[in-house]
């Protein structure tokens, strides 16, 4: 399910990314094409302005008062002299600017500059092409050009001939090749980036979905475990009630064993529901911690006193090793935490063993710990003991629903502390659970405030 979701996210992400990339490429290409075309037109306009200003002596050779200059024809040698120097300079300049001049007398070609730019058939097409005062696109010999027609204020003399019109053509071959190369680069880049983004998107989508997948799996496991834990006492209660209905004439004394069983299962259900409610409130940030000065030694002694009868009944020695350790904490929550740890320790410690509650200051904090000489916890189970409903015994033959340590961890973290478990303990046997608490609780967490705000908004909208 999550793989399909990741693929859908990647496809959506790729579609959006491809659209943005195509739009960006189109904008870059259109802007570049516009700038190239603007530069071409500006070059042609400048050349046309020179012709209209009668500055043809700087542009075209042969415009002299005498007839010294020979006619310029295709392949004709350039005569020596000042006009030839100007002609060579013009050839270099126009080649750099991609400009070609075709001088016309009506529709008859007088000359072209640079010489040999067009073949005779091509230049004849140029002469008859309908160029106007504004640049237009045309193609001659498979080469793209921009062309325009300029009528100078007086005829231009070329050798013994004169021209009354000039065709200015801009060779766009290099510019078109550049634009095609740019389009190829943009297309290849778009394809490459799409492939890379697809791989990166799938990796990021999988990573982003990982917490959701973990939460979903935890929720599914939670529902399955809660259903199992609720089903067992309900099934026992249903069976006992059926037994009572099968013998309606029996007195309470006759079914006292059934009533006791119902009482035990009811208590078990009540504990389970209370634990689930406590965890649900903790998740929503509704569980309130009311810190006030409290002595951990007093908490340890009071908890040991409450569990002393149970320890004595099981033949377990219950010890208290506590020194004064004042912290700001919720005394009731700490009693609940120590109660959970003592209940587990006594349950899994064999007769003749001992359980010890410790409390003392340590550096800038305080430590509350419960040690025992029980059977311990296998190493492979230690990383999961604080998970909800997790039990080292998969058959669930042990007592409890596996929520106690989860609640203990929440209480410790709600006070800004940490809880750790070691098995075997530092004394070489059993298990030790140590809770390290700060002397003062941290400021209220943002997540808690947000959760309460969300809850308030939900209640307000629901009412």
Image: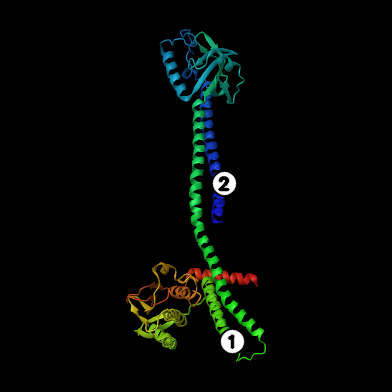
Q: Mark 2: give few (<14), some (14-19) or many (20+) Cα within 10 Å.
A: some
Above or below — where is 248 with respect to 382?
Answer: below
Residue 397: % across, % down: 49, 75
Q: Relative to 180, is 375 on the left or the right?
A: left
Above or below — where is 386 with respect to 122?
Answer: below
Q: Relative to 147, is 380 on the left or the right?
A: left
Above or below — where is 183 with respect to 284?
Answer: above
Q: Secondary structure at mark 2?
A: helix
2 or 1: mark nearer the eye: 1
Q: Mark 1: give few (<14), some (14-19) or many (20+) Cα within 10 Å.
A: some
Gap between marks 2 and 1, in whole Å?
66 Å
Q: Residue at x 64, y 85 (%)?
A: 244
Residue 202: % across, % down: 50, 51
Residue of label 1:
259
- Of mark 2 and mark 1, the one earlier in the sequence is 2
Specify whether residue 291 is in view.
no
Question: Which quadrant of the view contains residue 462?
Answer: bottom right
Question: Which quadrant of the view contains residue 26?
Answer: top right
Q: Nearer the viewer, residue 142 or 40?
A: 142
Residue of label 2:
15
Q: Nearer the viewer, residue 352 or 459?
A: 352
> Residue 316 has which mark?
none
Q: Secondary structure at mark 1?
A: helix
Specify whether residue 165 is in view.
yes
Q: Nearer the viewer, residue 104 or 457?
A: 457
Q: Nearer the viewer, residue 306 or 302?
A: 306
Q: Residue at x 63, y 83 (%)?
A: 243
């Amino acid at each position: 399910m999550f793989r399909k979701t990741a693929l859908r996210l990647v496809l959506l992400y790729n579609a959006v990314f491809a659209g943005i990339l195509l739009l960006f490429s189109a904008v870059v290409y259109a802007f570049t094409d516009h700038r190239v075309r603007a530069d071409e037109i500006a070059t042609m306009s400048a050349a046309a302005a020179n012709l209209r200003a009668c500055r043809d002596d700087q542009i075209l050779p042969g415009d002299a008062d005498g007839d010294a200059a020979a006619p310029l024809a295709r392949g004709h040698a350039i005569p020596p002299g000042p006009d030839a120097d100007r002609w060579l300079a013009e050839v270099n300049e126009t080649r750099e600017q991609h400009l070609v001049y075709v001088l016309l007398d009506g529709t008859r070609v007088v000359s072209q500059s640079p010489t040999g730019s067009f073949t005779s058939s091509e230049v004849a097409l140029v002469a008859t092409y309908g160029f106007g005062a504004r640049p237009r696109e045309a193609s001659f010999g498979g080469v793209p050009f921009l062309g325009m027609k300029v009528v100078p204020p007086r005829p231009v003399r070329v050798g013994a001939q004169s021209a009354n019109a000039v065709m200015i053509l801009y060779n766009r071959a290099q510019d078109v090749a550049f634009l095609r190369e740019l389009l190829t680069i943009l297309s290849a880049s778009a394809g490459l980036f799409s492939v890379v983004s697809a791989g990166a998107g799938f990796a990021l989508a999988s990573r982003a979905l990982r917490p959701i997948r973990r939460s979903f799996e935890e929720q599914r496991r939670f529902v399955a475990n809660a259903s199992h834990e609720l089903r067992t006492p309900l099934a026992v209660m249903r069976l006992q009630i059926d037994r009572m209905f099968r013998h309606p004439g029996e007195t309470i004394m006759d079914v006292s064993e059934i009533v006791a069983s119902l009482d035990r299962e009811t208590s078990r259900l009540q504990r389970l529901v209370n634990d689930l409610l406590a965890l649900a409130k903790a998740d929503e940030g509704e569980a309130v911690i009311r810190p006030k000065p409290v002595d951990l030694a007093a908490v340890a002694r009071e908890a040991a006193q409450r569990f002393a009868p149970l320890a004595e009944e099981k033949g377990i020695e219950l010890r208290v090793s506590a020194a004064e350790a004042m912290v700001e904490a919720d005394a009731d929550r700490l009693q609940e935490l120590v109660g959970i740890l003592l209940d587990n320790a006594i349950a899994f410690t064999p007769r003749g063993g001992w359980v010890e509650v410790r409390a003392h200051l340590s550096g800038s904090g305080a430590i509350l710990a419960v040690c025992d000489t029980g059977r311990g916890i296998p190493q492979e189970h230690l990383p999961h003991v604080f998970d909800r409903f997790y039990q080292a015994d998969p058959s669930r033959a042990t007592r409890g629903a596996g929520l106690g340590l989860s609640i203990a961890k929440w209480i410790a973290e709600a006070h800004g502390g940490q809880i750790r478990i070691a098995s075997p303990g530092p004394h070489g046997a059993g298990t030790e659970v140590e809770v390290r608490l700060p002397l003062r609780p941290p400021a209220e967490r943002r997540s808690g405030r947000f959760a309460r705000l969300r809850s308030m908004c939900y209640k307000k909208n629901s009412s």
